[in-house]
Image (tube, coloured by chain):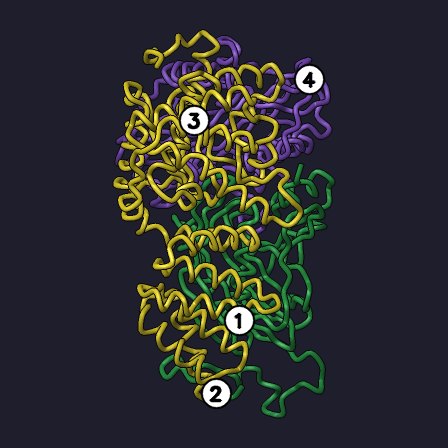
Chain colours: A green, B purple, C yellow
Amino acid sequence: MRLLPIAPLLVLILALLAGCATVTKVETGEQAVGARLVVSLEGPWNRIDAPGMGPAQVWTMEGLPVDQLLVYPGIKNGELVHASTGGSAKTFAFRSSMQPHEIVAMFEGMMTRDGSQFKLARLEPASFGGGKGFRFEYSVTRRSDSALLSGVAYGVVSEGELYAMLYHAPRLTFFPRHRGRVEQMARSAQLRAADAAALKASSGGGKRDCMRNPVTGMWTGC
Amino acid sequence: MRRSLVAMTLVAGIAFAPAFARAQSMNLAPGFSNLPKDATVVLMPADIELFSLSAGGVPEPKADWTEAAARHFRQALLAHNQKLGLRTVEVSEDAADELAEVNTLHAAVAQAIAVHHFGPLKLPTKEGKLDWSLSDAVAPVKKATGARYALFSWVRDSYASAERKAAMIALAVLGVGVAGGQQVAYASLVDLETGRVVWFNRMARAGGDLREAQPAAETVGSLLYGFPVAK
Amino acid sequence: MPARFARPAPETDEGGLWAIMDREERRLRRSPFALRDAKLRAYVQEIACKLAGEHCPDVRVHLVRAPLFNASMAPNGMMQVWTGLMLRVDNEAQLAAVLGHEIGHFLQRHTLERLRDAKARSAFGQFIGLFGVVGALAQVGALAGMFAFGQEHEREADTIGTTLMRNAGYDPNEAWKVWANLVLEIRARPGGESASPLFATHPPAAERQEALIALARDAAGGATNEAAWGEHVAPYRHEWLTEEVKRGVPEESLALLTRLKERSPKVAAYAWARGEVYRLRAGEDDLDRALEDYRAALAAGGEPPEAHRGIGLVHRTRRQAAEAKASFARYLEAAPQAPDFAMIKSYLEELSL
């Protein structure tokens, strides 16, 4: 029989039983995620670590069964955006050539492997990490318990790698409660240079050169 | 599948500390000590599932046992609340249909409490407190029932049997390392004015039997041990 | 026709089964996966009622959002019809063929027998799962083989179904087409026909098709009500086609959409949907095929705005700026409320630089 794709929660529980899952406090202030992504937090979060959870960092405020913030710190071309499950279940890998539509479709595929339903509410260009990225809003009907979730996400492809943040929580109470902090975190996100040679000549290697004017809709400094 | 994960976590939680050795404050939200004397409590429809364990330790849902268990559990709950002097109301089936989303929401929160408050995966931002609130998502419950508090309950109960093994993909993990039957359950009391979970208890043990009236009453007694009623 | 079933006493094993089914039905009623459109539900309920005759009061139809071909009926009268089925049948008569078949199982208490048998085989819980809001669609395929009705039961249900169709005024000659169409889809699957989730509990055999043709021979004539059917499902067609495309099984979708497109060339949505499948698969020559299909949708008229977007995206991929801009502009004009309006607008602006 085909195995169902293993949800992060199940992996977590297995790790828990094996004694190797941990929770770490992510403190207020500047936080680096991976080699290049840096976000600025106005308040603490909780980070869950367990072997086999997949390439994203998993953060939460209320606990994994309620809300999940997936932070992708540079997914390379060809890399899966979820834990590898073996078996014949469909997999979703990032390709550097992907356009925002395709990246959204990739995440949608990832989130609907278990029969959950996904509906895109909004997709728009947005500055993320100081680059020309995108932002999307979505809703999910979770198959396992029929929970109705709302989600918001930001992403950008920089030097062929994908940096993204996806946050989803029940549309009642919890998404409204925490979305503001997620948006703030996304707006604060910066990408450090991959190497010294890539540092811009301007003041201290400022990363905010590439910006989209929300009024005119024009990109400048990219 | 999600329900079985809670079961496993409750079991795992018990591996770290026995059920009744916890300090009372673990079960209570900060600032809450007990229900007022004449509080009205609405009994939300209990989420109960009974399983039989085959020789290989793999659980199989027993829908007919579950039917009986739901009946006994409800009776025992009503009797228990009456003994405590609480005013109890129940939700009609039609009203329950309307409240499905709130029920689902609470179930997710209860899982989070089981995994992250009573289990070893504590969330530092919660600072060790029972600090979860559904806020005004519970307003429809208050409106439909007129109650001040809502009592939610969830039970997963397995019984060893000599039946042939039946493969259940999602629930296969429940059988890992478990000898004999296990009864895992939680009860959750929510303040319908604020949406706060004010009292929560969970239980995991070998033994207990919901298929008969008398042992079902005992199960309810254990689950509601320390229920915060005013003396 | 047997007399209406009285509710069995709760202590009997049948009574227990009804109670279990009642519980599943309650869950289904409360589930966000249920399709609650009153008008569509009433329409399907009416068809089921016509077929069920004096059992009509005992049949309760539930529509479920799931992109697979499935319909089922539980011993307590709960009937499920999945949206994947409604996308695939061409008219009322074909739906009636499937529902009549299910009612046949119900009248002959086949499901009850299967339940008892499943109980004896310690596989009860899983079988119940097939009547619930299915836990995972992948499981449906895996479990279907275990719980398929035997050939004898299938034959009985087909015979009864045909009779019910005829009595309700439908053309029984539509029945075999339903299965023939499904087989087309199954055969398109890379790797072959084994364990396709499409068939849920009723894997069809070639003999069944022949038997259905034979049964229909003695009962020529009857209505198909294709126009009424089209009218009722039209508002949902776009949504169901989108879900089909999202399944990510291009070979099967192409088989289905090709059939639908060739049957109804005037329905732009079918051409558009097939275009989407080609564009997303993006194999050799697929982008050309996608353009062809999108243009066919435009020619048919009443095309979904996404057809323009599709053309724009293909041209954009090929760096054909002028064509891309023109199509994106048409999309924005046709769909000012589209979720990706801002994104497509920015593509357009980029192309203007």
- The residue carrying mark 3 is C215
Residue pictured at 35% horizontal, 44% vertical = B137
Vertical relation: B179 (above or below) C243: above
Which of label 4 and label 1 is nearer to you?
1
Question: Dot 1 corresponds to which residue?
Answer: C288
Crowding at dot 4, Cα within 10 Å, few <14 / some 14-19 / many 20+, comes out as some
Nearer the camera: disc 2 or disc 1: 1
In the image, residue C88 sits, relative to residue B42, either above or below, namely: below
Density class for disc 3 (Cα within 10 Å; few <14, some 14-19, many ≥20) is: some
* Element class at badge 1: helix
Q: Pointer 1 indicates a residue of which chain?
A: C
Q: Is residue C9 above or below residue C337?
A: above
Distance from disc 2 to disc 1, alpha carbons, whole Å, reads 35 Å
Q: Secondary structure at mark 2?
A: strand
Residue C285 spot, x, y in % from top left: 58, 69
Amino acid on which disc 2 is placed: Thr
**Residue that carries the numbered disc 2 in the rendered image:** A220
At label 4, which amino acid type do we have? Arg
Q: Disc 3 marks which amino acid? A: Leu
Which circle, 1 or 3, is nearer the viewer? 3
Tag nearer the camera, 3 or 2? 3
Q: C117 or C104, which is in the foreground? A: C104
On the same chain, marks 4 and 3? The answer is no
Location of the N terminus of chain B (image quadrant): top right
The residue pinned by badge 4 equals B164
Which chain letter matches label 2? A
Farthest residue to the bottom: give it: A201
Discs 4/3, front: 3
